Image (tube, rainbow, N blue to C red):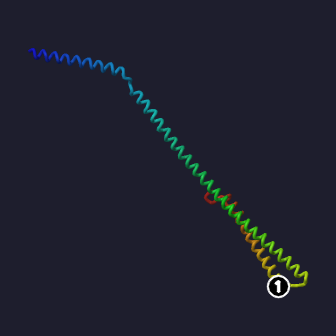
Amino acid sequence: MSDIEHLQGRILAALERASRGADKLAVAKDEIPDLSQDLAQERAVNVELAEQVEALKKRLADETSHLRAELATAQAQNNSADAARTQTEKLDMELQRVRRANAQLAEACAALREANAEGVGDAGLINVALQAELDAVHAARRADVAEADAILSVLTPLVPTAEESA
């Protein structure tokens, strides 16, 4: 029997220790704050932040497409300006040819007038004068074509295409 009493005492001591441990857990539970409300708040904030991120992504995509459109417009204007510059340079070159041809024509005409004033009708001078006049006419025509091209290169971007007017 003494073994039973001894075991009973040990069991009672173990139950007492378990009871004290349970009391300590109850006290500790009361001391630990309820984190479920904080967790719910954090989840709500997380959802709100996710919505803001999506809104920012959409705004970024819109801005990117807008900037790409502006870039395309600027590149088109730059290409148009380059074409106009090229046409202007071509026109300038043709006008310089006209000036040179006209200067040659003036020299040939002056030489022809001098020869006629002296009474000498030199066929070579007449040929030179006619060639200078022909060169001047060709240069004037090329200058006219270059001028028309320059005007068209400036006006073409201003005229709406069929796609734009539809």
Q: Position of residue 150 (x, y in %)?
A: 71, 64
Residue 105 image-quadrant placement: bottom right
Residue 44 image-quadrant placement: top left
- Judged left or right of residue 44, residue 164 is right
- Judged left or right of residue 106, residue 39 is left
- Judged left or right of residue 129, residue 17 is left
Circle 1 residue = 123
Residue 94 image-quadrant placement: bottom right
> In the depicted view, which residue is nearer to us: 46 or 143?
143
Within 10 Å of the Cα at label 1, are there few (<14), some (14-19), or many (20+) other Cα atoms?
A: few
Q: Position of residue 164 (x, y in %)?
A: 62, 57
> In the depicted view, which residue is nearer to us: 14 or 65?
14
Q: Residue at x 56, y 46 (%)?
A: 63
> In the depicted view, which residue is nearer to us: 121 or 20?
121
Q: Residue at x 75, y 72 (%)?
A: 139
> In the depicted view, which residue is nearer to us: 121 or 90?
121
Q: Position of residue 9 (x, y in %)?
A: 16, 15
Q: Residue at x 17, y 17 (%)?
A: 10
Which amino acid, mark 1?
Ala
